[in-house]
Image (cartoon, grey):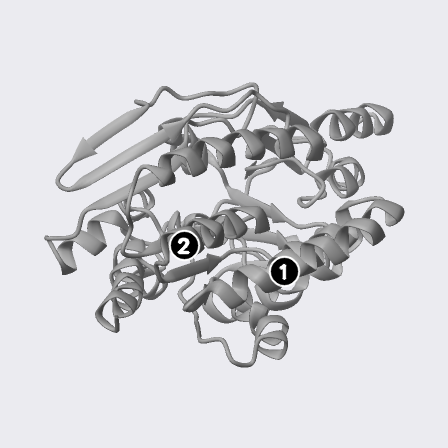
Amino acid sequence: MTRALREIDPSIELDVVTTLPNRYNSFCLDAPVIEEWDGVTIHRIELPAHKSGMWDQSLAFWSYASQARNMARNSQYDLVIATSSRLMTAVLGAWVASQQRAPLYLDIRDIFVDTIRDVLPRCSALLAKPLFAALERWAVKQANKVNLVSRGFAGYFEDRYPRQRFSYFTNGIDDEFLTSQPEEQQEPKHSLPLRVVYAGNIGEGQGLHAILPELGKRLEGRVNFRVIGDGGRKDLLRTGLDSAGVTNVALLPPMSRDQLIEEYKQADVLFLHLNDYDAFKKVLPSKVFEYAAMGKPIWAGIPGYSAEFVRTEISNAAVFPPCNAVAAEQVLVTLAIRDAPRCDFVKKFSRVNICRDLAKDILTLVRQR
């Protein structure tokens, strides 16, 4: 996005306030605290290590927010852009914009108020939801424009904020995955077992603990799963696999992107799953885009809008209801086990092209002042 903004207007100076890589306590990448290049300054804030639990993520965010606010006090911005996979990042961006009296562009990647109803215990959710709903209203109403990465969010936001302006720029495919797609269709594979790879977070939202113990057991001898990542439900998943006596699911630690791409290349099928929660009927996981770019068959337990998107946009993909091992087994046989380029999809959802259009949309706020 920074490059896209600078390409449109080379006079722009950008301050990016983010974090040092910290998603998993078990995996960290080195990155400079401050990085400067071509009119861009990136500030990376160090956070305490966490294991993706709600409490330690909250502490990590509080640390980030405190340091980001201190940085903002010493700067003057003409525009604030906040991209938010969690509501509180949007709230932080709204606070900075209000203090700076600057326009605010929000990029929303999750409906947190919906999600907490499903992922928190019932009593905690009942207490927390009114507070977070109020924070959401304040942040969205502070924004001059809001981008929603999923069309599935439209009903929720447009009904609640009819006076707000919305755009719909999705996630996209990074260059590393664009260059890794197969050049031509390959011959199908008929031998077993299939090598199935899942890569990503292993949390409540992904619900792997609710599907893989039974699914792995049903497919012994036919499928070997490789689950790459970490998260708050990894121990629960491991316990479930052990209790079911599953021997064909390997749990692997997080990997660098280069290593991950090699795992994708070695896979026969790429696996995706979301838990069976109403909130996830609206989302569009970013993982869909990198999976599709690899040209591999996709096997996805996803609901609602994301299921519709995959069926409509991605060839050689099989979709089943979340947490339904029987349905997952049934649709697996519909996949053609071969690599094939998805040229139209890649062209349509290249991150470079999406970022260019999103940057133009963002800069209209500055030009309207």
> What residue did someone put label 1 on?
319
| Closest to the observer, 133 or 26 | 133
**Which amino acid, by three-letter code, is at mark 1?**
Val
Q: Is residue 131 left or right of residue 201?
A: right
> What residue did someone put label 2 on?
97
**Which amino acid, by three-letter code, is at mark 2?**
Ala
Tell me which residue sits at (66%, 28%) in the image: 56
Alpha carbon of mark 1 to alpha carbon of mark 2: how far? 41 Å
Horizontal and vertical percent position of residue 170? 42, 62
Tell me which residue sits at (45%, 66%) in the image: 146
Q: In this view, does 154 lie above or below 249?
A: below
Q: What element carries label 1?
A: strand
Q: Can residue 110 be seen in this view?
A: yes
Q: Quadrant of residue 20?
A: top left
Between tags 1 and 2, which lies in front?
Answer: 2
Q: Residue 105 bears which disc, if any? A: none
Horizontal and vertical percent position of residue 46? 44, 23
Q: Is residue 227 above or below residue 85?
A: above
Horizontal and vertical percent position of residue 235? 74, 24
Tell me which residue sits at (10%, 53%) in the image: 10
Crowd class of label 1 (few under 14; some 14 to 19; many from 20; radius 10 Å): many
